Image (cartoon, rainbow, N blue to C red):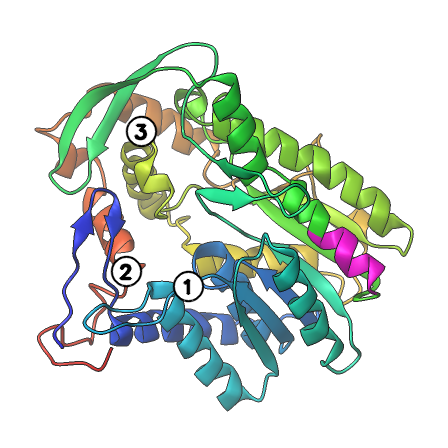
Amino acid sequence: MIVHPKMRGFICTTAHPVGCNMNVRHQAEYARQHKINGPKRVLVIGSSGGYGLACRLTAAFSCKADTVGVFFDRPASGSRTATAGWYNNVSFEKLAGQDGCAFISINGDAYSDEVKKQTIEAIKSLPGGQVDLVIYSLAAPNRVNPRDGQKHSSVIKPVGKSFTGKTVDFHTGQVYETSISPASEDEIAGTVAVMGGEDWLFWIEELKKSGSLAPKAATMAFSYIGPTLTHDIYKDGTIGRAKEDLEEKCTMINSLLAQDGGRAYVAVNKGLVTQASSAIPVVPLYISLIYKLMKEKGSHEGCIEQMVRLFERVYSGGSQPNWDSIPVDEKGRIRMDDWEMDDSIQSGLDKLWAKVSTENLEELTDIAGYREDFYRMFGFGIKGVDYQADVEI
């Protein structure tokens, strides 16, 4: 069939198999160009898109590591395409197989005990039977806690006060003000349960108990802080509460891993286009401005560029890193947002933010680049792909 993007709000409900394949190939080729003496067996929880996929590609093609990837994606059915993550994983497996990297992919609910057990069995089947790096990169709207069966949902809302701020409809280019009421206590708790660190802690506890972690193993989860103008809706909102919980759980995980010389980190990443970020007020407009400024300065990165730089930073001392040599901030976080938060970038942002409107959006921002990145996540807008051709979905 001929596949075109179909939108439902901030969600693209179709994915192009050839475009997704090309997108993964481009990222894999970038990773191949950066050889890293890094981890040899890597588990990526949330491996089919965004930073998680970029980590798996970096592990396999920069580090030549065996990988286990956990994701939750839907195959094609009838005239309905598969999800982008499904196609991404198919493409990863083909490339990894060609490069001789061992891989195991597990499609299921990573929050569940069943998938954790299945993953542990998969790790045991790898040479050595242990992983030396665990990447936790889950993003989901809901989670069922396997310990009590309770279902939680996340929301993107401010805490303690209403929020009013400037944002953009990146499809139409309309810049407008939006207002959001504050979250209830139940909504805050639900967001923390879904997007906080509890499940990350559950994973590490199970992996350690089963003997699946190698001595001096590392684990990393991802966060975002951003500038002051996004704080009310992000850092100081429900998502921010969840990220505070992530950092608290990181401290607990550190205590577990330290017994065998390991370490846990939260890496604070750059703001990029994701399906989640496209639904957060202010963020699409902010990212389109940051894209323009960082591209002009030559410091712009996509997911794969940033994750290669992260691996290079963590494993600069080789496959058994010296934890004390890894640069961190006062809270022990690895700041991969350092180029975004550069004073020259942020001061330029403040000037443009005050001026930007519907009328000058195309001139002052890189909204075109934002749109390109959004559609690229689903395999659309990739150079070299014939989108009028009939493809097997």
Dot 1, crowdedness within 10 Å: few (<14), some or many (≥20)?
Answer: some
Tell me which residue sits at (56%, 68%) in the image: 69
Q: In the figure, is residue 267 to the left or right of 341?
A: right
Residue marked by disc 1: 73
Residue marked by disc 3: 281
Amino acid type of disc 3? Pro
Res 25 quadrant in image: bottom left
**Is 357 covered by the magenta stretch?**
no
Give the mark nearer the N terminus: 1 vs 3: 1
Which element carries disc 3, helix, strand or loop? Answer: loop
Q: CA distance from mark 2 to mark 1?
A: 17 Å
Which element carries disc 2, helix, strand or loop? Answer: helix
Give the mark nearer the N terminus: 3 vs 2: 3
Residue 34: x and y in percent read 54, 71
Q: Is residue 287 above or below residue 114?
A: above
Q: Is residue 122 above or below residue 169?
A: below
Residue 104: x and y in percent read 59, 77
As drawn, the residue found furthest toward the right would be: 259
Dot 3, crowdedness within 10 Å: few (<14), some or many (≥20)?
Answer: many
Q: Quadrant of the N terminus?
A: bottom left
**Is 204 covered by the magenta stretch?**
yes
Tell me which residue sits at (31%, 28%) in the image: 282
